Image (cartoon, rainbow, N blue to C red):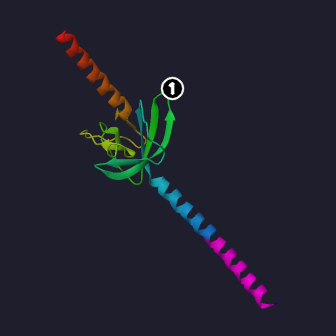
Amino acid sequence: MNKAERAETSVGVFALLAGAAILALTATMNRVRDAADDTAMSYVADFARVDGIRVGTPVRLAGVDVGTVSHLELDDHYRAVVTLTFTGDLPLPEDSAAIVETDGIFGQKYIELQPGGSESNLARGGKISFTQDSVIIEDLVSRIVQQAKATQKAAKDKSE
C-alpha cells in the first residue's frame, strides 16, 4: 500500500468513527430529552384567535420564559386549543389567565401567563379558563380610521 492509499484509508476510518460518534451522541440526547418529557407539565387554553402563535412559541410568566407552545388544534366550535408545556413543575392557580402578547409593536408573539389569586391550583393538563386573544394591528388601525372618519363627518354635519 502506498502513501496516498494509506492517507485515503485513514481519512475513511476517521469519517466512519466521527459518524458513529455523532449517532451515539444523538441517541443519548434523545434519551435525555425523553426523560425530561416525563417531568414536563402542560395546560391547555382555548382562544378565538391566536395569530402569530406557532408550535415552539415562548410562554412567559412575569416576562420570564417558562415553557413553549407544544400543540395547536381547532375544536368543534372552531376555537384554537393551545397546549402549553413547561419543563418542571409550574403550579398555577385555577383562576390564572393566558394572554397572547407581542414583543413591541411588530415583534414576536408569545403567551403571557398571569397567575390568579385562587388558593387551589390547576391539575396537570388542566384548562386555563381565562384567555385574551391576539390583537391584530391592522384591525386596530382600521377601527381608529373609521372612528376618525365618523367624528369628522359628525363635525361637518354639525357645522352645516
x%, y% of residue 152? Answer: 24, 19
User: Looking at the rendering, which quadrant does residue 156 occupy?
Assistant: top left
Lateral position of residue 136 relative to residue 159, left or right = right
Q: Quadrant of the C terminus?
A: top left
Is residue 135 visible to the viewer in this orientation of the structure?
no
x%, y% of residue 125? Answer: 43, 41
User: Looking at the rendering, which quadrant does residue 19 occupy?
Assistant: bottom right
Is 1 drawn above or below residue 38 in the view shown?
below
Residue shown at the point (51%, 26%) measured from the top left = 76
User: Does the magenta portion include 10?
Assistant: yes
Q: Mainly helix, strand or loop, the magenta region?
A: helix
Outermost residue toward the front?
160
Q: Residues within 10 Å of mark 1 (few under 14, many from 20)?
A: few
How many numbered discs, if any? 1
User: Does the magenta portion include 17?
Assistant: yes
Lateral position of residue 119 relative to residue 112, left or right = left
Pointer 1: what residue?
Answer: 76
Which span of residues is magenta-colored?
2-21
Lateral position of residue 150 relative to residue 23, left or right = left
Q: Nearer the viewer, residue 151 or 88?
A: 151
Is 23 drawn above or below residue 2 in the view shown?
above
Is residue 141 visible to the viewer in this orientation of the structure?
yes
x%, y% of residue 136? Answer: 38, 33
Q: Nearer the viewer, residue 37 or 149?
A: 149
Label 1 residue SS: loop
Outermost residue toward the bottom?
2
Q: Quadrant of the N terminus?
A: bottom right
x%, y% of residue 66? Answer: 36, 52
Is 92 drawn above or below residue 18 in the view shown?
above
Q: Nearer the viewer, residue 49 or 118?
A: 49
Q: Nearer the viewer, residue 144 or 128?
A: 144
- The amino acid type found where label 1 is placed reads Asp
